[in-house]
Amino acid sequence: MNPLAAYPVATLVTMIAVVLIEVLWLRTGIFRTAQYWVAMAIMFSFQVLVDGWLTKLSDPIVIYNPDTSLGVRFPWDIPIEDFGFGFAMLTLTIIVWKALGAEPREGHSR
């Protein structure tokens, strides 16, 4: 359980990079919107269900090398680093979507 292992370092770098892209460059303002935080709650809810099933230690489908992660698993044996990547992936997707000026579909308002 090396704190400088590849997975936690990559997770932290990715999360910081995404936050800096938002705060210093694109400035879409998503962190101040309720819609963003609702999207994060939905994503994390499904991530717990799916990731928990995939990584459960009793019968794993996905096996992580313990030397490449912190070894902290919560809840249901989910490597804590997975949540950082989930945050970064969804946040970057929303930031890019907003920065490109994605228009709502007909009948939907912003």
Image (spheres, rainbow, N blue to C red):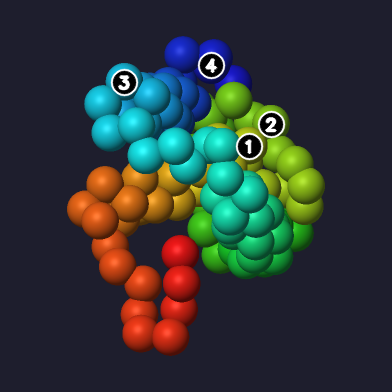
Query: Can residue 85 be seen from the camera position used here?
Result: no
Query: In terms of sequence position, does the residue under pointer 3 or pointer 2 come before the other?
Result: 3
Q: Amino acid at mark 1?
A: Ile
**Mark 1 lies on residue:** 80
Q: Amino acid at mark 2?
A: Val
**Mark 4 lies on residue:** 2
Asked if the residue under mark 4 is in contact with the one under mark 3, i.e. CB atoms within 8 Å, the reply is: no
Seen from the viewer's position, the closer of residues 68 and 36 is 36
Which quadrant of the view contains residue 14? top left
Asked if the residue under mark 1 is in contact with the one under mark 3, i.e. CB atoms within 8 Å, the reply is: no
Q: CA gap, disc 2 to disc 4?
A: 11 Å
Q: CA gap, disc 4 to disc 1?
A: 14 Å
Q: Position of residue 4 (x, y in %)?
A: 46, 14
Which of label 1 and label 2 is nearer to you? 1
Q: CA gap, disc 3 to disc 4?
A: 31 Å
**Mark 2 lies on residue:** 72
Q: Position of residue 65 (x, y in %)?
A: 49, 38
Query: In terms of sequence position, does the residue under pointer 3 or pointer 1 come before the other?
Result: 3
Q: CA gap, disc 3 to disc 1?
A: 27 Å
Residue for point 53% across, 29% down: 69
Q: CA gap, disc 1 to disc 2?
A: 6 Å
Residue for point 33% across, 52% down: 98
Query: In terms of sequence position, does the residue under pointer 4 or pointer 1 come before the other?
Result: 4
Asked if the residue under mark 2 is in contact with the one under mark 1, i.e. CB atoms within 8 Å, the reply is: yes
**Mark 3 lies on residue:** 24
Which of label 4 and label 1 is nearer to you? 1
- Using the image, tell me which numbered label, if any, was put on residue 100: none
Element class at badge 2:
loop
Query: In terms of sequence position, does the residue under pointer 1 or pointer 2 come before the other?
Result: 2
